[in-house]
Image (cartoon, rainbow, N blue to C red):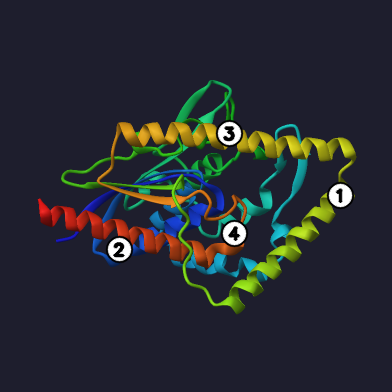
Amino acid sequence: MKKNVSLVLSGGGARGIAHIGVIEELEKQGFNIKSISGTSMGALIGGVYAVGKIKEYKEWIYSLDKLEIFRLIDFTFSSQGLVKGERVFKKMKKFIPDVNIEELKINYAATATDITNNKEIVFTNGRLYEAVRASVSIPTVFVPVKTKDSLLVDGGIMNNVPISNVKRTKNDILIVVNVNADVPVYKPPTSKSVKDKNQKAYSQKMNSFKNHLQNILPIQQNERFAYFNLISKTINILINQVSAMVIEKTPPDILINISIDSCGVFDFYKAEELVKIGKHIALKNIKEYKNKLNED
């Protein structure tokens, strides 16, 4: 009989791609995911899984090193964010169809932050796409989602490891995946030729991106861009401190820690490597959990 799982997926930008590997390993090991609670990238991966599109999403994200990534980025440089996000989220609609959360086969919750009313917003009904769009709105990067009475940004600001929002089922086990953990980095074996090829392609794109910014940004805007980076780093420190306290307060049955140093927030070109990391760490922690059960 398969063991039911209530799964919590943290935010963490590109590192959240590791959630795919974790989910694949859980299924391989015979676990049955009955409930998912996610923030930011965790909400996105959880939503894609809930609608049965995770295979297609993985294939697409694996191809990102072959695409003009920056064509998906529509810069705005407004006071609310660097990117409008319309192009990225239009692409996202391919993997998150127009469905209501309550129509999904598993229990699902996406976490966002209402910065107008200073409160956490938990989406457990309504349009799935709108819930994910709000949850992934990283402050200073994506323009926030405006509603009649609120302004919604990334749920990680208040709850990056949303254990409190996952719907538990009888006799389930709680599994938490934190992709911002202060643990050593695991590097999966990769052939040197593949690694060099990916790194070269990424470096070319990053250099092109930097040149593009220098051409379109006046000095004052360049300074603002530096401030965005500073603010983002500061926010990450605060988020990680709160996440550690949440995990300590509600210890999961299985905690899967992915190192915050696995990649940068926007290193989506490392998708294949990140999925391997997720699988490896998940398998290691699942074995430890099963061994402990056998000892008891």
Residue located beneath label 1 in the image: 214
Q: Characterize the local packing of mark 1: few (<14), some (14-19) or many (20 or more) Cα atoms within 10 angstroms.
A: few
Residue 96 visible in the picture: no
- Amino acid tagged 2: Glu
Say left or right for 276 vs 294: right
Check disc 2 and report its element: helix, strand or loop.
Answer: helix
Please, is residue 191 above or below residue 231 in the view?
Answer: below
Mark-to-mark CA distance, 3 and 4: 21 Å
Q: Earlier in the sequence, mark 4 or mark 2?
A: 2
Contact, CB < 8 Å: mark 1 with mark 3? no
Q: Residue 58 placed where, x, y %?
A: 50, 65
Mark-to-mark CA distance, 1 and 4: 23 Å
- Amino acid tagged 3: Ile
Q: Earlier in the sequence, mark 1 or mark 4?
A: 1
Q: Earlier in the sequence, mark 2 or mark 3?
A: 2
Contact, CB < 8 Å: mark 1 with mark 2? no
- Amino acid tagged 1: Gln
Residue located beneath label 3 in the image: 235
Q: What label sits on residue 268 in the rendered view?
A: 4
Mark-to-mark CA distance, 1 and 3: 25 Å
Q: Residue 78 placed where, x, y %?
A: 76, 36
Q: What label sits on residue 27 in the rendered view?
A: 2
Q: Characterize the local packing of mark 3: few (<14), some (14-19) or many (20 or more) Cα atoms within 10 angstroms.
A: some
Furthest residue toward left: 296
Q: Earlier in the sequence, mark 3 or mark 4?
A: 3
Q: Residue 9 placed where, x, y %?
A: 41, 47
Please identify the quadrant where the N terminus is shown.
bottom left
- Amino acid tagged 4: Phe
User: Residue, x 72% and y 63% (percent of image)?
Assistant: 203
Check disc 3 and report its element: helix, strand or loop.
Answer: helix
Contact, CB < 8 Å: mark 4 with mark 2? no
